[in-house]
Amino acid sequence: MLTLKLAWRNIWRNKRRTLITMTSIVVAVLLSAVMRSMQEGQYDDMIKSTVGTFSGYIQVHADGYWDNQTLENSFAATDSLLQTMRNPNNVTAVIPRIESFALGAGKQQSRPVMIMGIDVEAERNLSNPQQRLQKGTYFQSNDENAVLVGRDVLQRLNMQVGDSLVLLGQGFRGMSATGLYPVKGTVSFPNPEMNKSLVMLPLRTAQNFLAADGRLTSVAFKVDDPGAINPIIQHLRTKLPDNYEVMGWREMMPSLVQSIEADRGSGYIILGVLYMVVGFGILGTVLMMITERTYEFGIMLSVGTPRGKIARILSIEILFIALLGSAIGILISLPVAWYFHLNPIHLTGDMAAVTESYGLQPIIPFSVDPSIFLSQAVIILGITLLFSLIPVFNASKLNPVEAMRS
């Protein structure tokens, strides 16, 4: 206890020296935590934009559908099958869909379009078209004879809301798929390709159009915790027959996973450089702190203070400073990250155009995951203690006579 009291009093004997050392630690924690918060916030936004608002974190298909996405690889959606899919814990919603392609035509223009039949109520839990409406109104039922289209489809077809869209394609087992549907509204998604080609129909209307009554091409899942989908995937694989495939978003979108990991790796390199700069900065301040007290250590050694005790007192002093600096760094970085979490940085000009071309919103959001801030504080604390070992060791090996003469 006496050693702790001595260490605590010693660090406040020279407040300026202590504050310089502490400030370097605070700045290091602040910079590293805010940088990691920005990176992880962008990754979360990428995943949410591409997975959490369209494909779902988990999908169930008929075996072989993912490699050959045709109606021939659709499956019959029985009530018992859908009930089995709804059973796992942590599943917020089960969203059935039927997807295909067709030729969409107006009075003068025609373009290939992506057909998506959606359950009108269930889809609110994932892509939520009702909230993405730019013009018009949402579907009333799964039998409604109408379509919603991507915001750019009407321009490409030279049409307006209220006009009739002709759809020509091929249905299940080679059946002819033709239909005439009034355009009820337009929707806007972060992905520009969807805005150019997406045509949404109520589920039963789409099944009738494709001659695939009661069939689905996929069932998407929305979950409470995107980081804990593996147990759900394993449960579904155990409960569903072998002729179904259950895929997590990482399997469905390996390119997204690779781009995140590559960017995260470059971020680690930048953080490594920051850690080195911080480490040598802390080494310099600790050396300064010990050099200024050389005479003091000489006196302590000359009156019989054990060298080990001097080393312990110095170590505890540095530990106190590092803990205080890390705690203050966390307290400062949290409000900064929280502010930008609620008010993301909006990109403009060319940067916004490039971001949107990848199907992402032109914003830089920040993450407020507590583990980010705690981990950075622990890393900076460890670096501080590591770079302090040599000065502390040298101080404990001082010659008393030479120390008092210096």
Image: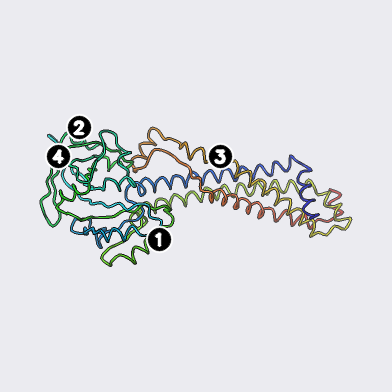
Which amino acid type is marked by label 2? Answer: Gln
Could you say which quadrant of the image residue 363 lies in? top left
Tell me which label, 3 or 4, sits earlier in the chain.
4
The residue sitting at 71% across, 48% down in the picture is 286
The one of 79 and 50 positioned closer to us in this rendering = 79
The residue sitting at 53% across, 43% down in the picture is 34
Crowding near the residue tagged with mark 2, few <14, some 14–19, many ≥20 C-alpha atoms within 10 Å: some
Tell me which label, 2 or 3, sits earlier in the chain.
2
Please name which of the two marks, 4 or 1, marks the residue nearer to the observer. 1
Q: Quick check: marks 4 and 1 in contact, CB under 8 Å?
A: no
Q: Which residue is mark 2?
A: 160
Q: Secondary structure at mark 1?
A: helix
Q: Which residue is mark 3?
A: 335
Q: Which residue is mark 1?
A: 230
Which amino acid type is marked by label 1? Answer: Asn
Tell me which label, 4 or 1, sits earlier in the chain.
4
Which amino acid type is marked by label 4? Answer: Ala
As displayed, is residue 33 above or below residue 311? above
The residue sitting at 43% across, 53% down in the picture is 225
Percent across and percent down for residue 284 are 69, 47
